[in-house]
Image (cartoon, coloured by chain):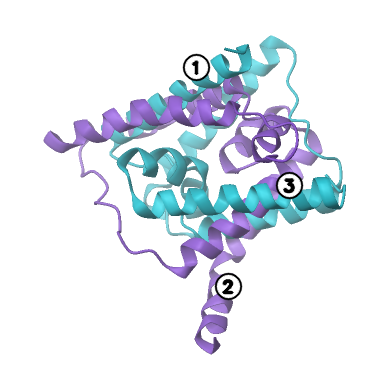
Chain colours: A purple, B cyan
């Protein structure tokens, strides 16, 4: 059952990414292009997604997940260097390509060799992340 | 309201509904980088079937819809150096920051997580500066 619902969730997620235009790298780079031909579509996508999810978080207060287990624990309030450094690296790659992990996967079906190369590089980057983390820690200890 | 914005809202609502189902039914956060990353580094081995099923839906369903519609293009750059560099940065960055646009942007902001809000400000700012430099200053993208 968990896998069945996960598949449905993935399908809805991917359909939403396609319909919203977020698998079109021009629209994503357009959102980031504050000094060019700015495209506000991404803000509508984010707003449209945050509303149902905010309601869902409210509903978690008085119940348990339908398929058992527990809801994720409360968010960690601590901000750290990792969060900032990782987000800056991610943002740079996002700006360069117009792709983030969700749309990169969702568009594999029609993204061609370029889309596949991006995903292979992304998976490689994810595999290298623990090593990159160790390097970052070493640098911040010296600093 | 331009039609693209309407589709943005509709697609966004589908994304948010998907995240809401994953939370309320499976009890989990729908973050693309975390779901994929856990399969890569082994931290998600105990629930790999759930992760793999979500990713299968994420790839197959829009792929089929795009095939039926007949037109779909990512308009991704053809510069392979940019593609590889961007993919590596997205992979490393999202894992170090423990989230991307779906995990931090949608799931985190919707519960007013300070970490998610800070992450989103940083990756949007970094993305905007990158576009400014590589598009307007250098003309690479």
Left or right of B45 in this view: A65: left
Residue A70, by quadrant, is top left
Residue drawn at 50 percent across, 25 percent down: A11
The secondary element bearing badge 1 is classed as helix
The mark lying in front, picked from 3 and 1, is 3
Reply above or below: A49 against B94: above
Q: Nearer the viewer, residue B119 or B102?
A: B119
Residue drawn at 59 percent across, 71 percent down: A132
On whether disc 2 and disc 1 are found on a single subunit, the reply is no
The disc at residue B131 is: 3
| Total labels drawn | 3
Residue drawn at 41 percent across, 28 percent down: B16
Q: Nearer the viewer, residue A27 or A73?
A: A27
* Percent x, y of residue B110: 35, 38
| Residue at the disc numbered 2 | A131
| Residue at the disc numbered 1 | B10
Q: Residues within 10 Å of mark 1 (few under 14, many from 20)?
A: many
């Amino acid at each position: 059952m968990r896998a069945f619902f996960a598949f449905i969730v993935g399908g809805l997620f991917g359909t939403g990414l396609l319909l919203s235009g977020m698998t079109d790298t021009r629209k994503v780079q357009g959102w980031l292009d504050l000094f060019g031909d700015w495209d506000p579509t991404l803000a509508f996508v984010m707003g449209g997604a945050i509303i149902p999810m905010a309601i869902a978080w409210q509903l978690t207060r008085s119940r348990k997940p339908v398929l058992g287990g527990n809801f994720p624990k409360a968010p960690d309030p601590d901000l750290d260097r990792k969060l900032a450094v990782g987000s800056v690296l991610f943002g740079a790659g996002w700006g360069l390509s117009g792709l983030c992990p969700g749309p990169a996967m969702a568009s594999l079906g029609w993204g061609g060799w370029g889309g596949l190369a991006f995903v292979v590089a992304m998976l490689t980057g994810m595999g290298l992340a623990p090593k990159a983390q160790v390097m970052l820690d070493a640098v911040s200890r010296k600093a | 309201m331009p039609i693209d914005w309407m589709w943005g809202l509709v697609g966004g609502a589908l994304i948010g509904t998907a995240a809401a189902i994953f939370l309320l039914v499976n009890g989990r956060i729908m973050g693309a980088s975390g779901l994929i990353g856990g399969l890569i580094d082994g931290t998600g081995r105990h629930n790999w079937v759930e992760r793999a099923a979500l990713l299968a839906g994420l790839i197959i369903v829009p792929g089929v819809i795009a095939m039926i519609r007949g037109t779909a293009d990512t308009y991704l750059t053809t510069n392979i150096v940019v593609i590889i560099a961007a993919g590596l940065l997205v992979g490393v960055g999202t894992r170090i920051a423990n989230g991307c646009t779906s995990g931090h942007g949608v799931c985190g902001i919707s519960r007013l997580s300070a970490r998610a809000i800070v992450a989103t400000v940083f990756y949007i700012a970094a993305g905007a500066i990158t576009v400014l430099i590589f598009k307007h200053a250098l003309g690479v993208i």
